[in-house]
Image (tube, rainbow, N blue to C red):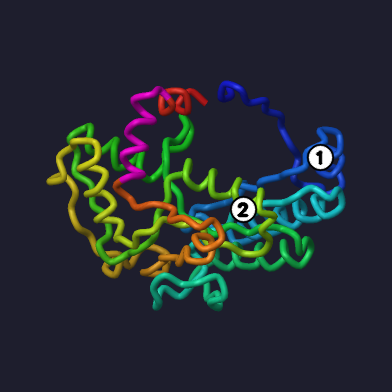
Amino acid sequence: MVLSGVEAQKVDLESADGLARTIEAGKFDLVIHTAGFTSVEECEARPDHAWHANVQLASNVAAACAGTGSLLVHISTDHLFSGNEIRVSEDHPVAPQNVYGRTKAEAERQVLAINPNALVVRTNFYGWGTRYRNSFSDAILGRLRSGAEISLFSDVFYTPILIEVLVRAVHDLVRLKARGVYHVAGDERLSKHEFGLRIAKAFGLDSGLIKSGMFASQEALVRRPFDMSLSNEKISKLLDRKLGGVDEQLDRLRRQEEDGLARELRQL
């Protein structure tokens, strides 16, 4: 199944030439590359696969778009830095802490080397997931609605953005012919624990089920940056607007469920 008003087709990313032929056949003038291997633990366990999925395939897409003249938007991550600074800007040196971060950083480097006109979007988004993959907000809502406790880290910080707001911002960047790296993140820096509390409030659920955990005490987990917050000052200045805070975006997330979008996505 696909979303109403959307036409879907399978695309092979293993060959830049084959992808270029697909782009030319469809007369696509914009390609948004979202594919990736995003599990931090799995990337650490399977570094060769992580490199192939996150770097090689992105390079193929960049080459195909460069060859056809199609604009490329490459979706990256906030997982690129040491975590020792807050609200880092686009020109802050990357210092990835694990295999996932290193492959995403290298993907950015190769994409821009192959296709200097590409737009690289660093972000950390949430929204309604599909039947085969829950989002972070889905996981929190699922636990709270079932009456189960959930532990969320109080020492990990980020700047989340609702995917609908992200999509609109990216379209605006494309319209303005933006190139290079942009941080498309929310206006607020908060912990994963605080984000869970905000979700509980927005959906009228029991915040007492949300327990505070500490990533620093999780020795079994792969090393991650404690602070992944991004500064969105660059895009805010270009668009001449704020991208929005968590509460207003969570209210939009709740209304999306009421309007039936969540149900439609879960059928995919």
Q: Name the residue under label 2.
A: 173
Q: Residue at x 49, y 64 (%)?
A: 79
Q: Position of residue 260 (x, y in %)?
A: 40, 22
Observer-nearest residue: 13 or 174? Answer: 174
Residue 45 in sight in this render: no
| Picture mark count | 2
Check whether the beta carbons of the residues at disc 2 and disc 1 lie within 8 A of each other. no
* Left or right: 179 as drawn, with respect to 27: left
Residue 181, picture quadrant? bottom right
Per the image, is 253 magenta? yes
User: Element type at marker 2?
Assistant: helix
In the displayed structure, 105 sits above or below 71; it is below
* Left or right: 163 as drawn, with respect to 68: left
Per the image, is 177 magenta? no
Q: Position of residue 127 (x, y in %)?
A: 42, 40
What residue type is disc 2 on? Leu
Q: Name the residue under label 1.
A: 23
Local packing at callout 2 (Cα closer than 10 Å; few below 14, some 14-19, many 20+) is some
Q: Which residue lies furthest to the left in this view?
A: 208
Observer-nearest residue: 14 or 167? Answer: 167
Residue 178 in sight in this render: yes
Local packing at callout 1 (Cα closer than 10 Å; few below 14, some 14-19, many 20+) is many
Quadrant location of the N terminus? top right
Q: Residue at x 24, y 48 (%)?
A: 198
Per the rendered image, the range of residues in magenta is 248-260
Q: Position of residue 39 (x, y in %)?
A: 49, 53
Q: Which residue is drawn at 45% across and 75% down?
A: 82
Q: Residue at x 39, y 78 (%)?
A: 84
